[in-house]
Image (tube, coloured by chain):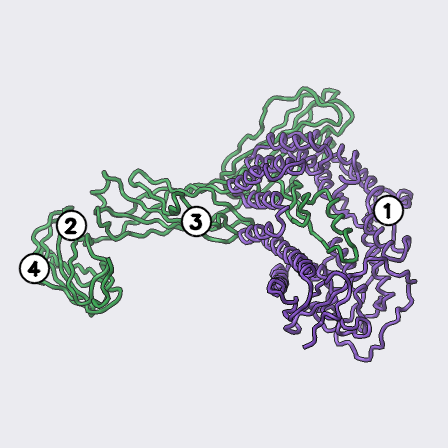
Chain colours: A green, B purple
Amino acid sequence: MDVNQPKQEHLLALKVMRLTKPTLFTNIPVTCEERDLPGDLLNQLMKDDPSTVKGAETLMLGEMLTLPQNFGNIFLGETFSSYISVHNDSNQVVKDILVKADLQTSSQRLNLSASSAAVAELKSDCCIDDVIHHEVKEIGTHILVCAVSYTTQTGEKMYFRKFFKFQVLKPLDVKTKFYNAESDLSSVTDEVFLEAQIQNITTSPMFMEKVSLEPSIMYNVAELNTVNKAGESVSTFGSRTYLQPMDTRQYLYCLKPKQEFAEKAGVIKGVTVIGKLDIVWKTNLGERGRLQTSQLQRMAPGYGDVRLSLETIPDTVNLEEPFDITCKITNCSERTMDLVLEMCNTNSIHWCGVSGRQLGKLHPSSSLHLALTLLSSVQGLQSVSGLRLMDTFLKRTYEYDDIAQVCVISSKVKEEH
Amino acid sequence: GASYSSLILGPAPDLTYHGALSCTISICSTTFSSCPLPDIGVGSQVPGPNCSILVATGRSSPTEEFSGDAVKDLMLRFLGEQAAVKRQVLNASSVEQSFVGLKQLINSKNWRAAVDLCGRLLTAHGQGYGKNGLPTNHTTDSLQLWFVRLALLVKLNLFQNAELEFEPFGNLDQPDLYYEYYPHVYPGRKGSMVPFSMRILHAELEQYLGNPQESLDRLHSMKTICTKILENLEQGLAEDGSMTNITQENTQASVELWRSRLGRVMYSMANCLLMMKDYVLAVDAYHTVIKYYPEQEPQLLSGIGRIFLQIGDIKTAEKYFQDVEKMSQKWDGLQYQIMVLMNRAFLHLGQNNFAEAHRAFTEILRIDPANAVANNNAAVCLLYLGKLKDSLRQLEGMVQQDPKHYLHESVLFNLTTMYELESSRSMQKKQALLEAVAVKEGDSFNTQCLKLG
């Protein structure tokens, strides 16, 4: 990890130490009872040990801070902090010292030094210290390049560089799934549910401080990851506020197109931009990381030329009792249609009314509402299927099955209201 | 059936443990001898009962000599023979061959020598070196010696050695570990001779070997037995569930004993869960521990706060620290004040504010100048603030002022890490530390922290 230039006797030495947060020293408690042979001896040893918690020496987690012993891992979104020390190893005074620290990635070179001014002189055994911080925004190979230039007592100008290579890894695996809602009963808008699966692919636990969805201009977002408990917003994850390594968590968001985009909602085709996820996490002693995903995209479900969506349907109906539903038929094509409605029965669904009736002409991007009656002959969760629309102009039939689900109960079990 | 009250000896009823062998839990009352062992020359035999029954299990024998001094070895390598010769530590032969000598070795942190002395004393009990595989007679005293030896091996972090030496004892419930097995030595007494603390050690050892689940399993069965005993006592029965005539005050002593034992088991479980990084369960377990050790409530709540800091949940850590601050009515005094300041400092660390954390640690030093933790932590903060020289000055000052307390491996780890950061001449300074350690520390000193390779 440490690539140096060919050896040359320099008066100054450069040392670099990555400053991850310190860790807490843990003790191994060994106790006994008064009646045992050592009596109070073992307990006294623990009391005298400076690293135990006074008054609770059996507690393993102490209070002594220990400096990091190795470079560790570094992940995208975290802050890279490092101590850079230039020490005068010689016994002469050195002049005009300039220390520069740059970070080289595959795409850019950044200057990290706090000050760009030269230090006038550095006495023997003294040092110039700097702590640099950098929020890592790229994955892959990073090289910390430290350059030191100085002038010796005799006026000779000297220069050397040191390179420190490290890898930045990916901390999270994010998968997204989109679900289309069945039409909202109160307003005919297209709700889209986004499920974001976030997996911790680091080697230590992560506290998820904030996971939010920033919607694109087309949508309003409602997060569905908290519940209201006694007036307080409690996370759906309960007391498990952190992710262990390799654990996955799902977050749910509901996106509604904004009013001005709502009319177009019925005829959205192709790819739409939904928004992006903003994730903030913390690890040991509050070490912070932050990532944003790229813009999440959704392929609009193909509605084809004619879209049939459900407007109203009861949740629960009685066995063999007719019930009403209303549908909305939208012409998503560029041409006028002349539609004929056909109803086909299934094993459980029986339509009431006249099949094969004409619905009339439907112009492009316009819709009509349809009231239908049906009944179910089978108990349980039944799927409403069997509607067919035929475009008489093109002689094309569009089939609509599994439009919605309804719960069918025996009429002997009356719902309590 | 006959009542056992006539067989009860001694003033205070001491309960021994009865494991999985049978369903009854026996009473035994005796006090463990806390006087020094009779001065036995090494090698002489203790006359024992005529044991015609071959012991099925329970052969145990202390293995190998543990004496050695890592500090002296390093001195030979880095400081030369003249310096190494000056290093004087107590060893097993330089003290009285009794518990008095053992105590000296333990106190002076010459635990390797202490382990060896235990071995010699066990040899005197007929359980000497190389006697593995031969019939052994356990006594309460020999088991206590085993306990001390095993406890010291764990303190020395020699977990594999401890596991090896525990092996012949099985799950601590073999027949020859019960009083009933030695009717001539302990007439009428019943129950396990194994010290409760040895059972705790046996359970905890597994997590240090990388088997925390096994630790939890053992602790759970101990918890079950302790709970059952307490239930029996609460119902006015004897510990093993039988009818009893024991006085109220003796029962109370037994209840207190078993309650404290149950508390110790819960403490172990909480620590084990923490080691397994099962933070949710660990936090719950520590809350239970508070019920058994209410006097440790502020320390335990602060510890839970630190767990949340480790996870990265700074807000919940803050809540716990605030709860501790609210207890000022119940607790006061120096220790509590220090706890509150320590928590504040840790919260600042969690909020990335090293300057404020340094201020809080320094505040502790104002009221407790000798506080090792505050000193060490303040120095650590200085490093993060870019003040290497100041940090070194603080730690070196600590070590020079009070080497008895400050030559601790965690402090020395920090010191040597900073020496390596400071200059290429860190070797000299580390050797100077070695010299300081050589003067003060016993053979149990963990030399890894000196980073001399």
Circles 4 and 3 in contact, beta carbons < 8 Å = no
Q: Nearer the viewer, residue A360 or A143?
A: A360
Nearer the N terminus, badge 4 or badge 3? 3
SS category of the residue bearing label 3: strand
Q: Are marks 2 and 3 in contact (CB under 8 Å)?
A: no
In the rendered image, residue A383, in percent from the top left (x then y), is placed at 24, 63
| Relative height, residue A309 to residue A73 (above, below) | below
Label 4 marks a residue whose chain is: A
Query: Whole-Å distance between the Cαs marked 2 and 4?
Result: 18 Å
The crowd level at tag 3 (other Cα within 10 Å; few <14, some 14-19, many 20+) is: some
Q: Horizontal placement of A135 versus A182: left or right?
A: right
Rate crowding at label 1 as few (under 14), some (14 to 19) or many (20 or more) other CA atoms within 10 Å: some
Mark 4 → mark 1, Cα distance in angstroms: 105 Å
For residue B12, which quarter of the picture? Answer: bottom right
Q: Are marks 2 and 3 on the same chain?
A: yes
Q: Amino acid at mark 2?
A: Asn
Rendered location of residue B13, percent (x, y)? 72, 63
Q: CA distance from mark 3 to mark 1?
A: 56 Å
